[in-house]
Image (spheres, helix red, strand yellow):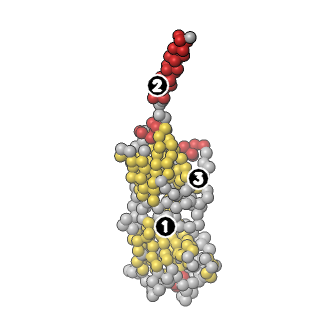
Amino acid sequence: MKKVLNLALAFIITAVFVACSNDDNTEVTTGDLTIDLTGLEELGSDYVYEGWLIVDGNPVSTGTFTSVSFPQTYTVDINDLQTATTFVLSIEPAGEIGEAALTPAATKILVGDFSGSSASVSSTGIVGDFSNSWGKYILATPTDDDDTNEASGVWFLDNTNAPTVVTGLGLPTLTEGWKYEGWVVLNGVPVSTGTFSAVDATDDNAATSPYKGSIGNGPGFPGEDYVIGAAAGINFPTDLKGATIVISVEPSPDNSSAPFTLKPLEDVVPVDAMNHSVINMSAGPIKVLTGSVTR
């Protein structure tokens, strides 16, 4: 009987030892990636944010998200986590499948290289550097022949040395996937002046604006006449003095009717502004998005 007990005890000890040895040698296959970002806003319902690790020059998704409450942590392959050189955040169509889901869209919003266990990410290196941006505009309604409503249009140009007219915007050329958009805030509601890529050319809706007059599309610069129709509960024409003028940076394509979080230029139109006279814009509330990523 004693021999049987000893054998049983030896078997138990051996089994425990083997089990412990197996636990100790278990290979770690995943790790945590934590992102802590500032300034992001929720996207329209058809889009999501997606993180990417750049591993040996190739993108590896870390997952999508819509909530802009941070920090957020994601579980990713340990080898990808340890060998990644860069983190990229992009804006992607929701529910994307197939080949398109394997690489970031053109609309990349944050990027940063890893140094050890962390990366500082910023929009400056991937969207544009707006630190030296400047803007000017005038109040005028060149798309109609009524000279009594000149305060109902805004045009981003400089006519100081008229008849020579030059651009009123000093903005960097945006990377693929982004466009500028002008806005006038009426009754607290932003109303677009149109999207544009070039500061010295008409904006994208110059010929199709629902608010412009009937005698032309206006000068060859971004801007808008609000002389027919209505928006934000205001019938046009109106008086833009006291309204807020904004230049934002928008994802393209974009399914949101509101300005995106990046707003490099902004100005409240002086109540004593003179029509056709240049007004200088101020720095906008958000010129750069930043954050940190740790592994």
Tell me the kind of residue under disc 3.
Pro
Question: Which residue occupies 51% across, 43% down?
Answer: 75
Residue 126 on image: x %, y %: 43, 55
Q: Is residue 18 visible?
A: no
Tell me the kind of residue under disc 1.
Ser
Whole-Å distance between the Cαs marked 1 and 2? 59 Å
Give the image quarter of residue 284. Answer: bottom left
Tell me the kind of residue under disc 2.
Ser
Residue 86 on image: x %, y %: 41, 46
Question: What is the secondary structure assignment of the residue under circle 3?
Answer: strand
Residue 124 on image: x %, y %: 40, 58
Mark linked to residue 206 = none
Residue hosting label 2? 21
Residue hosting label 1? 248
Whole-Å distance between the Cαs marked 2 and 3? 47 Å
Dot 2 surroundings within 10 Å: few (below 14), some, or many (20 or more)?
few
Q: Nearer the viewer, residue 129 or 277?
A: 129
Q: Nearer the viewer, mark 1 or mark 2?
A: 2
Mark linked to residue 93 = 3
